[in-house]
Amino acid sequence: MAKGGGKNNGGVQNRAIYSRVSFLQQAAVFLSQQSQSQQSVQPSTSSTLVPNVPPPPPTALDGMSRRLATDLRSVSLKTRIRLSPAVKRTICKYCDSVLIDGSTCTAFIENRSRGGRKPWADVLVRGCHACKKERRYPIEAKRTKRKTERGVVEGENVGDVMEVDAPAGGKGKGQKQQGQKQKQKQSQGQVQVELREQKG
């Protein structure tokens, strides 16, 4: 006979793995923030900003945060658990550094549609300062419905016929066939009406 309750009784499966991944992510972010704060506290050698000054060398904390991020990714791959997209986006895919907007990466929104007309074409571009690589993430914007799915526009009646301009080259092949079919139906209808009148 089976036991009354299962092994987890409504709990989360792989709780230890999820807690480990969560700890690794929090520790990597914390160490990355600490390394950035140490670099900003160190006094600069010159009082003015020089445009071609190389960035300060990575600290030991920065290397530790990268190692924790690497461990996080390897744990999730080995145990086959899925990381949420929010966690994936905080780690550089190429160098495993923790991405913090403004300090370890730059983020901006790009729209490559013609003239930026399509709001659903917005893409978040995050560039890592360590490896100089960029990743692009689509921004979830609501797309407008197609004309056929929009419904009736205000001011139009349901029975109104919408006029469509023909292409400059005349009717296309499909339009010619439709026009011929309509003419045939009209001529058949006229013949039937004439036959009824003759009989009656």
Image (cartoon, rainbow, N blue to C red):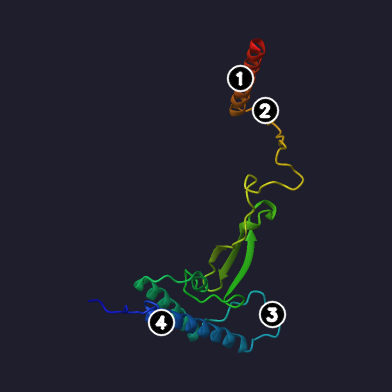
Q: Identify the residue shown where x is 59% and y is 65%.
A: 125
Please name the residue that numbered disc 4 is placed on: 20
Asked whether, in this view, residue 76 is left or right of residue 163, the answer is left
Please name the residue that numbered disc 3 is placed on: 49
Precedes in sequence: disc 4 or disc 2: 4
Question: Is label 2 in a helix, a strand or a loop?
Answer: loop
Precedes in sequence: disc 4 or disc 1: 4
Cα distance in 3D space between marks 4 and 1: 75 Å
Please name the residue that numbered disc 1 is placed on: 184
Q: Type of residue at label 3?
A: Leu
Q: In the rendered structure, are the residues bearing label 2 and label 1 in contact, judged by CB atoms less than 8 Å apart? A: no
Closer to the camera: disc 4 or disc 1? 1
Please name the residue that numbered disc 2 is placed on: 169
Query: Observer-nearest residue: 8 or 194?
Result: 194
Precedes in sequence: disc 4 or disc 3: 4
Closer to the camera: disc 4 or disc 3? 4
Precedes in sequence: disc 3 or disc 1: 3
Q: Type of residue at label 2?
A: Gly
Task: Tell me where residue 90 appears, x and y as whole percent.
Answer: 52, 74
Cα distance in 3D space between marks 3 and 1: 82 Å
Cα distance in 3D space between marks 4 and 2: 67 Å
Query: Observer-nearest residue: 76 or 100?
Result: 76
Question: Is label 3 in a helix, a strand or a loop?
Answer: loop
Q: Type of residue at label 1?
A: Gln
Question: Is label 4 in a helix, a strand or a loop?
Answer: helix
Cα distance in 3D space between marks 4 and 3: 42 Å
Q: In the rendered structure, are the residues bearing label 3 and label 2 in contact, judged by CB atoms less than 8 Å apart? A: no
Q: In the rendered structure, are the residues bearing label 3 and label 1 in contact, judged by CB atoms less than 8 Å apart? A: no
The N terminus is located in which quarter? bottom left
